[in-house]
Amino acid sequence: MTPRRPSPDRLRGMSADEAAAHWIVRRGGSYWTSEDAARLDAWLAGDESHRLALKRAEAVVSLLEGAGDDDLLAEMRSAALAVKTEWPTWRTRSIAAAAAAAVAIVGLGWLWGGGRIVLEGVHEGEAFNQPQPTEVDPLQQSGDPDFATERGQRLDFVLGDGTQITLDTDSAIDVAYQRDRRIVRLLKGRAFFDVAHDTARPFVVQAADRAITAVGTQFDVRLDNDSLRVLLVTGSVHVDHPVPRLGATQADRSVKLEPGDRLTLAFGSPPTVERLPDTSVELLWRRGLVQFDETPLAEAAREINRYATNTLIIREDSVGRLRVSGIFRTGDPARFARSVSSLLPVRVVEGSHGQVELASSTPAR
């Protein structure tokens, strides 16, 4: 039985994710026609959110198709297969089709924003007793971090005021509250902050030479060797220099972000702000996942290596320049390498001490 082709009015009544799931399932069948292709093109051209929804659905399908024996993805497959849809044959076509249906019904809830998912190497549920207020400016102090993760770990905890923080791999923060403000220093790595509302005491995250100030909001901060990124999810924040620099412009000294804004500061360069249509992709790391979109393989490998002690190696420039797209699980470079080898003209070379190399599938003679 061929799934019925919904009318244009019916498509307009669907959410973007529901329609994207429909197109993926129909496009994968033998009943795909030139008329379908034309209607898909028209749907994609109708709104930018349609293109983004289709890319999200494609990424989830590619993730599930290469799931293997992954426990987390097995849960996602089970949820996908349990979905009841208007088109009965969706449930029997394949795991990919059922997964696409799940994308439409639950809105990617299993990946971001749904139930809590616990992965290996993750510590969670720890509480932090609020320290006594201090009159010494914590921005000028140094000391051992209050919370830190090793490579491959992720840590969820709650501060005494109710602020929730998630630390990414190889990250560290120092906490010091004052009577008139709450201060956290991001010493390295990445952290997501869900700030408890307190107008009397603003919440300040200090990273490098910047201070990110909020009252009650959600935002993500990533500190690398050569850059700082701040992504605002809800509320508003100001990103300032704690001490104004000689000759600095107002734009350099203070930037106000609105929800969806991502500030990027490459050290030594003026800040840039871009509006992201979908912040959830940037926060996949909180679920142990990462998404690449036409990303050079060398750059993708560096990101994967942040989460593992057994690193992925790329020696050939031609391999490093290949581009990869999709959603992948962090913490397992070997699994990532196997997935990439099924997508790109590369082969996996097993090395010593758990190292894995991606090399050209046609080695030079």
Image (cartoon, helix red, strand yellow):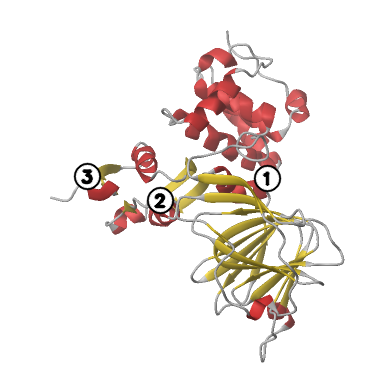
In the displayed structure, 314 sits above or below 16; it is: below
Q: Kindly indicate the quadrant of the structure image that contains residue 306.
A: bottom left
Q: Position of residue 239 (x, y in %)?
A: 71, 71
In whole angstroms, how far apart are the C-alphas of marks 2 and 3? 28 Å
Quadrant (top left/top right/bottom left/bottom right) for the N terminus: top right
Q: Is residue 286 left or right of residue 225?
A: right
Residue in view at x 77 percent, y 57 percent: 161
Tell me if I can see residue 358 in this picture.
no
Return the mark for residue 308.
2
**Amino acid type, callout 1:** Glu
* Label 2 with label 3: CB-CB less than 8 Å: no
Q: Nearer the viewer, residue 335 or 31?
A: 335
Q: Position of residue 204 (x, y in %)?
A: 72, 68
Return the mark for residue 48.
1
Q: Nearer the viewer, residue 75 or 46?
A: 75
First along the sequence among labels 3 and 1: 1
* Label 1 with label 2: CB-CB less than 8 Å: no
Q: Nearer the viewer, residue 301 or 8?
A: 301
Q: Secondary structure at mark 2?
A: loop
Residue in view at x 73 percent, y 55 percent: 163
Residue in view at x 66 percent, y 77 percent: 139
Q: Nearer the viewer, residue 209 or 25?
A: 209
